[in-house]
Amino acid sequence: MPNNSSNHNFLHTIAAAPALYKWAGVALIVVLAAGWLSSGSGGGASRPQTEPMMPSLLSGLANTFPTGSLTAFPPLPKGVVTPAAVPARVPVQAGPLILPAQTPPSAPVAGHAQITLAGAALPPYGVRPAFQSLGRARDAEPIASFTVDAPKPLAAVAPSAGLIRLHWRAWYQATKTGAHTLVASIAGGDLRSVTVRVDGQQAPVIAGSRAVCSAFDGCPPTATTAAGAAQLATGWHEIEVEAVADVTGTPRPSVTLYVRGPGTDTPVALVPSWPAAARRAPSPCWRPSMAPAGAPSLPPCAQAGTAP
């Protein structure tokens, strides 16, 4: 009964209070009741925690870093090259390479060329032949045309079997800078290979061959043509033709070189030039008073007192 009297007094007090206080009291009672029910103290079991702990741990860990600690590294001082730096590329000149003019060892004479003769035994299939140089000669030729055979000055040492190789060299004077088309016309018999190089360049301007002869039909009368182009500057340029053929092949193959300069329509036979032959050294001579005993007879020296 005392409790009922107390509750009655409490309710009576609320009823006697103004309207604003009444609603404030009711709201307070509702908030207290809701908090008591959510805390589980009302006799129910507490709810298991379903949220993982990792986010709270990471958030707390992140809060321990000072502000600005995750910014970019400070810039390197000027002049320091990092391993990731890419070196600057040197710009490459666009367009084809123009071969500059060369300087002959002496004044070239038109209508001459140099031929070097070499021979080799016929090697097994797939093996490169080992050529042995047999000599060289200066030949008079009005145009760049030669037969793949030993020239007359070297006929005595011409190979009798296997392969023969000729190196034909001459100087050519370009009158205008630009693209020069070189054409090699191969006639006669079979030719294993022919290459044309300009100014000692490793890559040949022309590379060709001729294998059209047969035991029944022989060799056709038409020539085989191989061509290439090179950018030449105005001036002298050295032309080298290498031709390899079988020694016993008949008829002998022949090579004729044509050139078409920039701005021209028709190729013409290349006119070779080669420096004049060097003067021979003077023959030895003896003064009669200094001639040793048993010495061969030699002409007297041109000037008195000249020793050999």
Image (cartoon, rainbow, N blue to C red):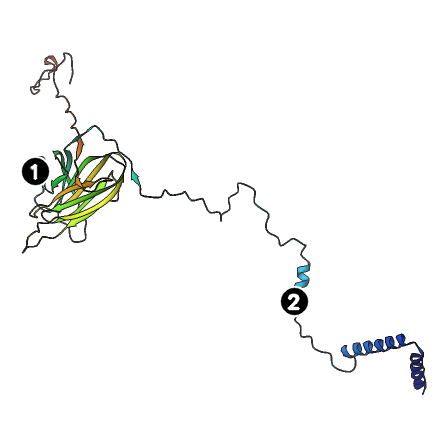
Instruction: Tell me residue 16's x, y (percent).
Output: 94, 79
- Separation of disc 2 and disc 1 at Cα? 100 Å
Identify the residue under disc 2.
55
Q: Which mark is residue 155?
A: 1
Q: Nearer the viewer, residue 48 or 68?
A: 68
Q: Nearer the viewer, residue 240 or 27?
A: 27
Instruction: Tell me residue 218's x, y (percent).
Output: 6, 53
Contact, CB < 8 Å: mark 2 with mark 1? no
Label 1: how many residues lie within 10 Å, few (<14), some (14-19) or many (20+)?
Answer: few
Amino acid, disc 2: Pro
Q: Quadrant of the C terminus?
A: top left
Q: Nearer the viewer, residue 269 or 255?
A: 269
Labels 2 and 1: the sequence-earlier one: 2
274 displayed left or right of 87: left
Q: Nearer the viewer, residue 164 or 141?
A: 141
Q: Tell me if residue 72 comes above or below residue 44 in the rendering.
A: above
Q: Residue furthest left?
A: 216
Q: Quadrant of residue 67?
A: bottom right
Q: Tell me if residue 229 comes above or below residue 33 in the rendering.
A: above
Instruction: Tell me residue 56's x, y (percent).
Output: 68, 66
Q: Quadrant of the N terminus?
A: bottom right
Q: Residue furthest bottom?
A: 1
The answer to whether any part of residue 60 appears in the image is yes
Instruction: Tell me residue 71's x, y (percent).
Output: 62, 53
The answer to whether any part of residue 205 appears in the image is no
Amino acid, disc 1: Ala
Q: Quadrant of residue 232?
A: top left
Q: Which mark is residue 206?
A: none
- Dot 1: element: helix
